[in-house]
Image: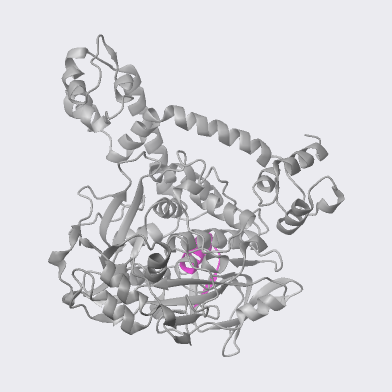
């Protein structure tokens, strides 16, 4: 019935969609299998993309040829750049999306790719022969052959939904769970675990008193996620902020005895940094209120997402508590919040390419690896799709280092440290975050993606090269152009900065704290005229390069030191048990993970600096 596909992607969430387009745009013939074509790229939880560190990931996905940034730009209803009061390493774009439009745009882009076919059905197992995956098997007994398989199952593997004392199978509200894959993988020798996540109730916006809440508008100067010519957002939709109170907490506590989280029915660990409201008031009992973000689900719906009120308490308790919140006194629920438990497979069972160690050409991406978040899933899907294509071509895997991208940090953490709770990316996880900014993702990654053979990046690469050259021109102008005291002393006085006593280069003035390039341009007519020839993005990159030059060089030196360890290769067949000088824990962890380099070995939990020294001595270093 089916021809042999190059790659089958199981699941059409954020990871699955990116995996499919990445492989297809590299030339593979892809089959995307999903249980429901109407929920492709469904935003199961918050209708938003980006945020702290997550926004950097979306820009990296875009720079590598992924579509998440493009879809977000086409469908967002509000944009904000977070952390602008901090340094540029912390700036993080975030967009509120139209949930329905997001799904439809993704589906349109997927259907427009002639290298992607679709099949709507549940995958219940894999076809594996002699340790190599050969395709998938569906619930109706249909076999679809392929050279590689990417599993992006999200929360569907043996998913269990909890609302109070009620429990029923499901991958998300209104959709059945997926069965069969876990059991087969375990029979093949894989270790499986359980995790949990949750979602808040959805509310009828017509029943909310918006006037009682604090309005949260989008940025005046709207930016974008994609480096392509996507449309600029107009007519932004505001979000709102309100708070819980002691009365809300007291009502919620009346349901604790029926809470699946507190009575032991939920076994999986939930996300530490996105706890349910009952978990918050239990863990932070000293706080008398918690902030809630009231977010619209789209332009053409009254459905509202209550961010910060995730709950698995009985629906009657959720409803009573909700109505004690300021602005929600007459609120009606569309559906209650719930918790969901699902199977995952500890990512230490994967290679750095996201290929499984036990089954050749089988890849895992997204929540099956223990992560949480659309952005984390999308980036893994992209990398799995690229590496599945490379694997069937017998080419070396594409691996991003920690110094290359947040995506590299994410995958390195998963493989070498593992996770026993849903993993979420933060800027603090990246030791080279001054190098891994959201503004330079295209400069860092587009040349790499183009060299890999990702189609459609020729124009992007031209833009990157042009931006780099233009930024250098701006920097050169600042280093060569002098400014006199009478031109800027009035401005410096306003900034409470010491006046000039003689002519200095513009570069020196710009390096002063609280002095911005656009402010100097407003003061100096020649600079203003010069700056008109460059777009905002180029000027921003040039300014950051100049202001943070010392910090950037310091991080580059740190990268060079680490790369020396990354250059010391380790054979996959290396027998660590022969080195009795290694600690027993190191021998166990190194044998299980099989690091490719000394650098990777140094980041494995349980491998000490002393163990690394033993390895280096053994290798004659």
Asked if residue 344 is positioned above or below residue 36 in the image, the reply reads: above
The segment highlighted magenta reads 16-33
Q: Residue at x 62, y 33 (%)?
A: 561
Q: What residue appears at the point 66 percent right and 66 percent down from the top-left corner?
A: 361
Name the outermost residue toward the top. 502
Front residue (pair 405, 190): 190
Quarter residue 306 falls in: bottom left
The C terminus - image quarter: top right
Q: How many numbered discs? A: 0
Q: Residue furthest left?
A: 211
Q: Position of residue 351 (x, y in %)?
A: 66, 58
Query: With 447 as the anchor, is 286 left or right in this view?
Result: left
Task: Tell me if residue 564 is in the magenta stretch.
Answer: no
> Is-magenta flag for residue 25?
yes
* 203 versus 57 height, above or below: below
Question: In the displayed structure, does residue 37 sit left or right of residue 320?
Answer: right
Please state the horizontal and vertical placement of residue 31, each as a whole percent of the image. Answer: 53, 74
Please determine whether, in this image, residue 428 is positioned above or below residue 308. above
Residue at screen point 32% across, 70% down: 249
Residue in view at x 37 percent, y 71 percent = 310
Name the spot of residue 460 as percent of width and height, x first. Answer: 41, 47
Along the line of sight, the residue nearer the viewer: 465 or 292: 292
Q: Is residue 488 left or right of residue 154?
A: left
Q: Is residue 279 left or right of residue 414?
A: left
| Residue 480, image quadrant | top left
Image quarter hosting the N terminus: bottom right
Q: Position of residue 520 (x, y in %)?
A: 22, 27
In-front residue for pair 188/288: 288
Kindly tell me whether residue 35 is visible in this rendering.
no
| Residue 324 seen in render | yes
- Above or below 569: residue 46: below
Judge by depth and name the residue closer to the eye, 79 or 30.
Answer: 79
């Amino acid at each position: 019935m089916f021809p042999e596909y190059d790659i089958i992607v199981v699941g059409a969430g954020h990871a699955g969609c990116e995996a499919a387009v990445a492989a297809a745009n590299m030339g593979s013939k892809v089959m995307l299998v999903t249980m429901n074509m109407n929920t492709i790229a469904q935003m199961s939880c918050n209708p938003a993309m980006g945020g702290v560190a997550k926004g950097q990931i979306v820009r990296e996905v875009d720079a590598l040829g992924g579509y998440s940034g493009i879809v977000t730009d086409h469908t967002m209803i509000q944009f904000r750049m977070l952390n602008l009061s901090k340094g540029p390493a912390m700036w993080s774009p975030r967009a509120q999306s139209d949930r329905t439009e997001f799904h439809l745009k993704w589906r349109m882009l997927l259907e427009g790719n002639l290298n992607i076919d679709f099949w709507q059905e549940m995958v219940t197992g894999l076809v594996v022969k002699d340790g190599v995956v050969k395709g998938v098997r569906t619930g109706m007994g249909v076999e679809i052959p392929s050279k590689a398989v990417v599993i992006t199952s999200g929360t569907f593997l043996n998913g269990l939904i909890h609302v109070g004392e009620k429990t029923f199978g499901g991958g998300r509200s209104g959709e059945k769970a997926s069965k069969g894959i876990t059991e087969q993988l375990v029979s093949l020798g894989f270790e499986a675990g359980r995790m949990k996540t949750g979602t808040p109730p959805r509310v009828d916006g017509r029943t909310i008193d918006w006037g009682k809440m604090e309005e949260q508008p989008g940025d005046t100067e709207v930016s974008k996620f994609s480096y392509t010519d996507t449309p600029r957002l107009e007519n932004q939709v505001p979000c709102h902020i309100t708070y819980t109170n002691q009365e809300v907490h007291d009502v919620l506590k009346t349901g604790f005895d029926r809470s699946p989280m507190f009575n032991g029915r939920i076994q999986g660990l939930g996300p530490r940094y996105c706890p349910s409201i009952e978990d918050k008031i239990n863990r932070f009992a000293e706080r008398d209120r918690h902030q809630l973000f009231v977010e619209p689900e789209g332009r053409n719906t009254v459905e509202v997402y209550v961010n910060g009120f995730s709950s698995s308490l009985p629906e009657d308790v959720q409803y009573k508590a909700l109505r004690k919140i300021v602005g929600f006194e007459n609120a009606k629920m569309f559906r209650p919040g719930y918790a969901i438990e699902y199977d995952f497979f500890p990512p230490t069972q994967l290679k750095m390419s996201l290929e499984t160690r036990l089954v050749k050409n089988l890849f895992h991406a997204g929540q099956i690896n223990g992560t949480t978040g659309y952005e984390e899933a999308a980036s893994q899907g992209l990398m799995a799709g690229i590496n599945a294509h490379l694997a069937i071509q017998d080419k070396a895997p594409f691996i991003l280092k920690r110094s290359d991208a947040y995506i590299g940090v994410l995958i390195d953490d998963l493989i070498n440290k593992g996770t026993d709770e849903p993993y979420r990316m933060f800027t603090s996880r990246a030791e080279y975050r001054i190098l891994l900014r959201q503004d330079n993702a295209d400069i860092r990654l587009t040349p790499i993606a183009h060299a890999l053979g990702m189609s459609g990046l020729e124009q992007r690469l031209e833009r990157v090269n042009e931006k780099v050259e233009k930024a250098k021109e701006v920097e050169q102008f600042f280093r060569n152009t002098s400014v006199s005291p009478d031109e800027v002393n009035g401005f410096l006085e306003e900034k409470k900065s010491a006046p000039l006593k003689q002519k200095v280069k513009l570069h020196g003035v710009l390096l002063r704290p609280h002095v911005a390039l656009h402010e100097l341009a407003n003061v100096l007519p020649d600079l203003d005229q010069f700056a008109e020839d460059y777009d905002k993005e180029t000027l921003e990159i040039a300014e950051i390069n100049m202001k943070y030059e010392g910090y950037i060089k310091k991080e580059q030196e740190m990268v060079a030191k680490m790369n020396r360890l990354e250059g010391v290769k380790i054979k996959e067949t290396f027998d660590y048990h022969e080195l009795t000088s290694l600690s027993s824990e190191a021998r166990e962890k190194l044998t299980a993970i099989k690091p490719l380099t000394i650098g990777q070995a140094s980041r494995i939990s349980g491998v000490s600096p002393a163990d690394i020294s033993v390895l280096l001595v053994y290798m004659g270093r």
